[in-house]
Every structure is written in C-alpha cells, then in structure tokens.
Image (cartoon, rainbow, N blue to C red):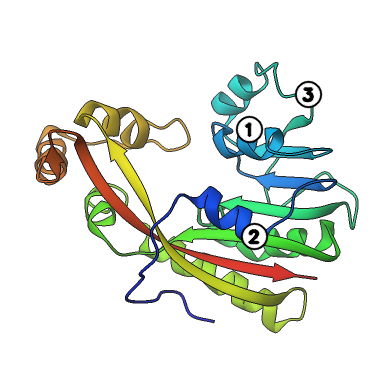
Amino acid sequence: MKIAQSPINKTCKEREILNQELSFDNKKILELGCGKAKLTRIIAQGGKNRHVTATEVDKIQHKKNLQINDLPNVDFVFAGSQNLPFEDNSFDIILLFKSLHHVPMEYMDDAMKEISRVLKPEGLAYISEPIFAGDFNDILRLFHDEQEVRAAAFDSIIKCVKAGDLKLVKQIFFKTPRNYPEFSDFEQLIINVTHSNHQLNDELMEEVKRKFMAHMSDTGAHFETPIRVDLLTK
C-alpha cells in the first residue's frame, strides 16, 4: 500500500469512482463523518432499497442534518467513529469521505477496529483521503496543515490490514475538481467551517487570499485535489 501516487492521470467527481466500485442497491450503508450530507443525499436517492446511516460529530452540523426531511431512508446519528453505537456485522458498505484524518489521532486505531467490527463479512469499506499535495493543499496548509494527521490516518489503515482485521481490495488514485466562484466562497466553505476553529490574523488572511487569487479566472478559482481511496473488505 502507498500513501500517494504521481502522476495521477484521472480527474473526476468522487461519485464516478463510487459508481464504478460499489453497488448500493439493497444494501445497508454507513457513512462516517457525513458533514453536510451532500454525498449522503446522492447515495440515498440514487437507486432502490438503500438504507443509509450517516454519523457526524460536529454538533452544529448534526443539528442541521436532523432538519432534513426529504430523505426517509437516511438516519442521522451523532457518533464518533471510534465508538459506534451499532451491532457487530451490521453494514454491507462503510464510507468515509475525507473524514478519517479528522478523527483524533489517539483514536484512529480504535476507529479502524470499529469499522471492522460493524462491517459484515465480505462487506466493503471505502475510505477516501486527500493526498498532501497540490495547489489547493498549498493554500490550506497556510492555516491548517494536515500532513501529520493524514499520515497518521494512513498508518491506522496499514495497521488494520497488517493485523488482519480488514484486507485490501485495491487502491484508487484520482483528482477531483474544486471550484470557488469568489474568495468569499472559499472563506465560508473552508475557513469558517464549524468543525474546526481556524483563527487567522489579518496578515495570514491576506497571504491566504493572495495565494487563492493567483488561481482566479473569469469563471472562478479552479483546483484539482489528489485523492487516495483504500477499498477494504472483511
């Protein structure tokens, strides 16, 4: 297993990778760290007889998710990945979209054990993580450097596989496009997220804005973020 690959020639939305690798119909699906539930919605509404349980630890975002009333086949649960309130062998598919590295480092190994515990035999765990590279990452690291936590998340996956709790099916590397019409969109969606407390002084904010605006065009600022998917089974 490798944490990164270069070059990466494929660029696509993550949903394309999902559709290639996973079959969600007639499945019980667990999404850990669902955020604003954008991919939750796509998965829940994309086929037939799908039941999604979507967890979140951000109390503010979880409260907003509970107001969603048009996804009858989705249960929103407040829970951390290191302590899941579910029975053993409960889910056919477990999804983590760029969320494992947000688990506190001291709990990452526990989170992987929990994923193994609640995954059904021959079920699939799909873990996507951003690779520490690229123009977008160079801006993000100015105020939120994730190199250490991303490496720790990968190490937890490696340890889980070496322990035999899960086994690797394949690794997938691709780049996903990110577009921001204005800097204010980046500020709202990245700097002012409720799950992190980013404190930028005026000087740092100006440096972030300067680097961001270097990518601005008539159609906004466009980035391609490199992503690694570790597809695992039990």
**Which quarter of the image is occupied by the C terminus?**
bottom right
Say left or right for 153 vs 232: left
In this rendering, the label closer to the viewer, 2 or 1: 1
Q: Earlier in the sequence, mark 3 or mark 2?
A: 3
**Relative to 90, does residue 195 appear above or below in the rendering?**
above
**Residue topped by disc 3:** 72
Q: Quadrant of residue 55?
A: top right
**Residue tagged 2:** 126
Asked which secondary structure carries label 2, the reply is strand
Mark pair 2, 1: CA separation: 17 Å
Q: Amino acid at mark 1?
A: Arg
Q: Nearer the viewer, residue 11 or 127?
A: 11
Q: Secondary structure at mark 3?
A: loop
Residue 27: give x, y in percent of width and height: 83, 48
Q: Is residue 180 left or right of residue 123?
A: left
Which amino acid, mark 2? Tyr
Residue positioned 60% across, 77% down in the render: 158
Residue type at mark 3? Pro
Q: Residue at x 12, y 38 (%)?
A: 217
Q: Quadrant of residue 166?
A: bottom right
- Give the mark nearer the N terminus: 2 vs 1: 1
